[in-house]
Image: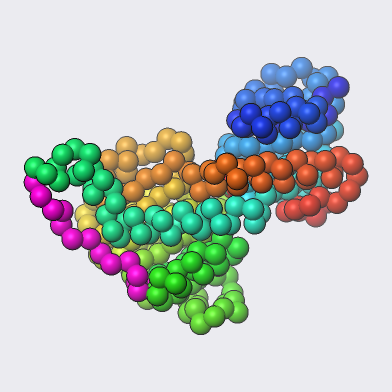
Amino acid sequence: MTRILAIGSYTDTDSAALAGMGAQALPSLDALASLPQDLRSGVEGLAYKGHAALGGDSMDLLPGLRVIANFGVGYDAIDVEAATARGIVVTNTPDVLNDDVADLAVGMLIAQNRGFEPAMAAVRSGDWSAKGDLPLARKMSGRRVGVLGLGRIGQEIAARLVPFKCEIHYWSRSPKSTPGWTFHDDPVALARAVDDMIVAVVGGPETEGLVSAQVIEALGTDGVLVNIARGSVIDEAALIEALEQGRIRGAALDVFRGEPHVDPRLARLPNLLPLPHIGSATVETRAAMGALQRRNLQAVLAGDAAVTPVNAV
Ligand code: 8YV
């Protein structure tokens, strides 16, 4: 009997480990409804990897479900309220990816300020020898950087920027005890106070469109906006307009609304550095995320407390 379903695309190592626990693989959430009812009825654990919305309707297809173990720290795709109402424990994979995501955010800020993309293109295309040196880029060390959301990942980002002599400003639901970083009580005030902004808040309804047209405007024509959180946090239409009109100098995005489909107007902008959601995409971190996902599944199915639950059931 199948006790565990593993939805999503896993590495060979993770697939083997899940299969070792008796899990049946399912490529996507859409395929759930077409599974035979007797198979669905026996499922108690769901290993979930993906960003498609997992709501109460899907949970109801698995009436014996006890745990949804999400592969990822962000669980905005999962209707946690619906899970709690059904007595289902939801878990995520926090902390093990902080370093990778923070490394990427800082790398994106450097790459965008120093103009890595046009510089690489000049070498590859032969323009360097044909047309000579590129226009000068901007110095990154010493810039004033605003971190929007000072949770686990936001703190790692801010800490990494200190050795770059950056002045750190942040917005968070409440002020934190920090080594001299400046708190702002609204995102527009944060944007006004800094040169560049890095978005590190959780996704979901409470942060939907938090980076509004006003925030982008307040960042100003020298500003760079970096997003390693969720596409839903940024008013993408306002960002496209601002990038097209040069009202913001650049953006570096690892996440998009409706990803993996990216608005073509956004994708073709020369002042955008786009990445395909690779924040946690290293061999080491993905292995740690998979291991934590499985530990959560095993714990709940054995009747123990989840290792990293996000709801109280
Ligand atoms: C995804 C992420 O988990 O952890 C998160 O919240 O967004 C990523 O690490 C990864 O893309 C796998 O879906």
Query: Between 191 and 252, which is closer to the camera in this rendering?
Result: 252
Residue 122 can be seen, yes or no? yes
Any magenta on residue 50? Answer: no
Look at 26% across and 45% down and name the residue there.
Answer: 120
38 to the left or right of 281: right
Image quadrant where one finds the N terminus? top right
Q: Report the magenta residues as a range.
A: 131-144
Q: Position of residue 16 (x, y in %)?
A: 71, 28
Q: Position of residue 282 (x, y in %)?
A: 54, 44
Name the magenta segment's main secondary structure.
loop
Ligand 1 rendered quadrant = top right
Residue furthest to the bottom: 180
184 to the left or right of 45: left
Query: Between 216 and 109, which is closer to the camera in this rendering?
Result: 109
73 to the left or right of 144: right
**Which quarter of the picture shows residue 14?**
top right
Any magenta on residue 133? Answer: yes
